[in-house]
Image (spheres, rainbow, N blue to C red):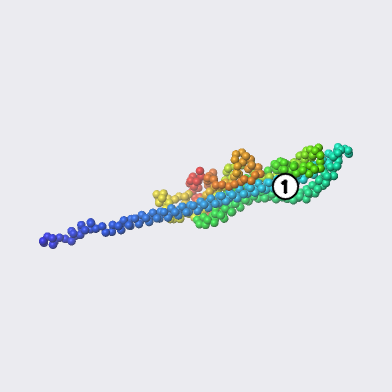
Amino acid sequence: MSTGMNSSPGASSAPSLRRDERGAVLLVGIFAAALLFGAAFFVLGVGDSISHRETMQDAADTGAYTTAVLNARAMNLVVLLNLTKLSVAATVTSLLAVIAGATKTIAFILSLGPTNPLLPAIPALTAINTQTLAQYESIRSDAESALRAADRAQLALAERMPEIAAAQASRAVLAYGPPVSRGTAVARPLPIRRGQPITLCQKAMPLATPPALRAFDPVAPEPAKQHARLETSLALMPSCLSLGAAAMELQPNTQLGGERFQLRYYVVGGAMPTRGENGVEIASWERGVDQADNGALGFAQAEYYFDGDGAQAQKDADELWTLGWRARFRRFRAPDLAGELSSACRTGAGPCGQALQAPADLAQKVAH
């Protein structure tokens, strides 16, 4: 009995401590909470990164497509002004051809002698000549003014529309708000030039000849009509060339789909949020986010093109007589990415300047 009474308290409490399971759930809960907190931080960080990148990319896509659409519209406006020049040249040339044809036909009739049966047509031809001359004198100055105005408008479109397009794109990009701070692109003039007057006149001749001959149909017999057609053909080209009008055309060796029609747009913004950057680090096994991937720069590419196939599309595009210029996205390709970035960020600082610290690395990542 004395042996049981003298047993120490520690001997009985040790087995009880080993068998005690109180607090085990607390330890599991602590580890689970830490794991869930890390997972939540990872998910939120990756979400921030995705949202940041999508906003930057959407803004860049908007800028690139806006500039391409406005450049395509400018090309269609150039085509419309070419057609306007063609209409004016055909109208004026028709009047000149009628005057020349009437004069030559009268001379032809008189050359047949005083007894020829065509003499009764002379008063009608004289009236046509007088009326047409009055019409020509009334519109000549207006026609020349219209042609000069069309020339100036086309040159202004070629030089200024790309700048206007870049400004419009910049406003659209800034509407996205943070993290976008500004957007920029390298503006390029439209690849067009003033062609030769003979090209426009060759296009106008088929349009001018029928109206020029129509006035002779009710008053002149067939021999006179044939002579008028000949005289009209001879007089048509010099009369048209005297206007000095010329249509716009694509610059030589400008290929559809070539670099000249590619438009790249760059969007500069704030760097990726810290939580997003940490989330990306966790997702990439702590490899970090280098300067090319920190989300401070977005970029996209679009082009304006002529809607057609094969050689005929190139021919129609070269001549600029057909409406059909469109815009579309293209895969981003930059032969001189570092140079374009330097030009686009020439006046930039902060994030844009940071993005340029490693242009070779960035070029390697995005230039395919």
Q: In this picture, is 180 found above or below 248?
A: below
Which three-letter amino acid code belongs to the residue tagged 1? Val
Regarding residue 104, the answer to whether it shows in the image is no
Spot the residue most to the left.
1
Tell which of 29 and 345 is nearer to you.
29
Query: Helix or strand or loop: what does disc 1 sit on?
Result: helix
- Residue 87 is left or right of residue 125, and the answer is left
Residue appearing at x 84%, y 42% in the figure: 121
Spot the residue most to the front.
218
- Residue 50 is left or right of residue 23, and the answer is right
Q: How many marks?
A: 1
Q: Quadrant of residue 233?
A: top right
Regarding residue 58, the answer to whether it shows in the image is yes
* Residue 249, x across and y down, in percent: 66, 44
Tell which of 141 and 291 is nearer to you.
141
* Residue 20, x across and y down, in percent: 24, 58
* Residue 290, x across and y down, in percent: 45, 50
Q: Quadrant of residue 1?
A: bottom left
Q: Which residue is mark 1?
A: 88
* Residue 31, x across and y down, in percent: 33, 55
Tell which of 329 and 358 is nearer to you.
329
Residue appearing at x 71%, y 48% in the figure: 147
Tell which of 260 and 22 is nearer to you.
22
Residue appearing at x 74%, y 43% in the figure: 208
For mark 1, does the 10 Å Cα neighbourhood hold few (<14), some (14 to 19), or many (20 or more) residues? many
Residue appearing at x 81%, y 42% in the figure: 219
